[in-house]
Amino acid sequence: MEKAIKNITAPQIAGGKKYILPPWRINEILLEVFSVLSEEEYYKEGFDYKKMIEGMGIKVKKFSSFSPENLERFKENSLSLWDEGVCLLFPDNETREQLRMIAYNDSHNAVETMQIILHEFAHIRLRHTQQSINGEVEATCFSMAMSLMFMMEEKFHIGMRAVQLEGKDFFMDSIRKCIGKKEVA
C-alpha cells in the first residue's frame, strides 16, 4: 500500500524525473472541480456522486459486471494508465454519437471506489484524449480535490452553509477569488 501511495503522489516520466503539475494548471483543475460541484449542488441532502456522473450521460459499471475478455479489451482501449478503473469514449454503432463509460474495480472499500470512479471521471471532464503521465497526474489532482470536498461536506456542511447564508453564486465567486489571488502549490 505504501508503494502505491508513493507512486500516486510522485509520478515519474521517462528517466525517473518526477512530474509535477504547474500551479496554474492545478488552479484550473480546482476551478473545474468546484464548478462541477456547484452546478450539481453537491451540498444538498442525499447527493450521490455516481448519480451525478450518470446524469451527465456517462455509464458507470463495476468490473464484475463484465466478462474477463471484455474487461481486458476495455483496459487496452482506456484513457487511464492504471488497472483500477477504465475510462472509455466510443461511438455508438447506430447513431455514431460519442458514448462515455467508466468501469471500476469493485473489490475496494467505498472511499477507494469513489477515488477510482472520480479519477476516471476526471479524464472525461478534463477532455483527455490519450494516455499520458500528465493526464494521470491531472486526474489524480481532480479526484482528490473532489473527494475531499465530498468528505468535508459530509462532515462540516461547508457548501450547504455557504449557500444557505450567502447563495450559490457567493460560493463559486469566493472560490474563484481565492484561487485567483494566490498560487496553489
Image (cartoon, grey):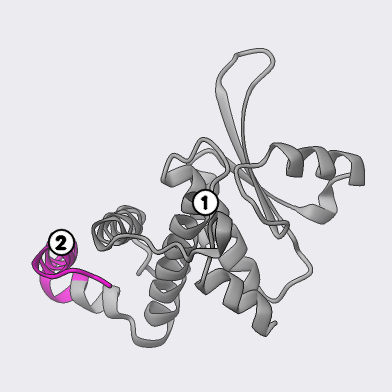
Report which quarter residue 125 is drawn in: top left
Q: In x, y percent, where is residue 16?
A: 56, 64
Q: Amino acid at mark 1?
A: Phe
Query: What residue is pinned by disc 1?
Result: 121
Q: In x, y percent, where is residue 36?
A: 34, 54
Report which quarter residue 173 is drawn in: bottom left
Report the predominant secondary structure element of the magenta stretch.
helix
Magenta region includes residue 168? yes
x 63%, y 73%: residue: 112
Is residue 7 visible from the viewing direction of this image? Answer: yes
Mark 1: secondary structure:
helix
x 54%, y 54%: residue: 51
Along the line of sight, the residue nearer the viewer: 128 or 151: 128
Q: Quadrant of the C terminus?
A: bottom left
Along the line of sight, the residue nearer the viewer: 136 or 119: 136
Task: State whether residue 29 is above or below residue 79.
Answer: below
Q: CA distance from mark 1 to mark 2?
A: 22 Å
Q: Quadrant of the N terminus?
A: bottom right
Task: State whether residue 30 is above or below residue 165.
Answer: above
Report which quarter residue 166 is drawn in: bottom left
**Mark 1 crowd level (few <14, some 14–19, many ≥20, 10 Å Cα):** many
Sequence-first tag of 1 and 2: 1
Magenta region includes residue 77? no
Q: Which residues are magenta?
A: 163-185
Q: In x, y percent, where is residue 91?
A: 62, 22
Along the line of sight, the residue nearer the viewer: 136 or 58: 136
Please give left or right for residue 88 compared with residue 180 in the image.
right
Mark linked to residue 176:
2
Single out the residue that lies furthest toward the right: 68
x 40%, y 69%: residue: 145
Q: Amino acid at mark 2?
A: Arg
**Mark 2 crowd level (few <14, some 14–19, many ≥20, 10 Å Cα):** some
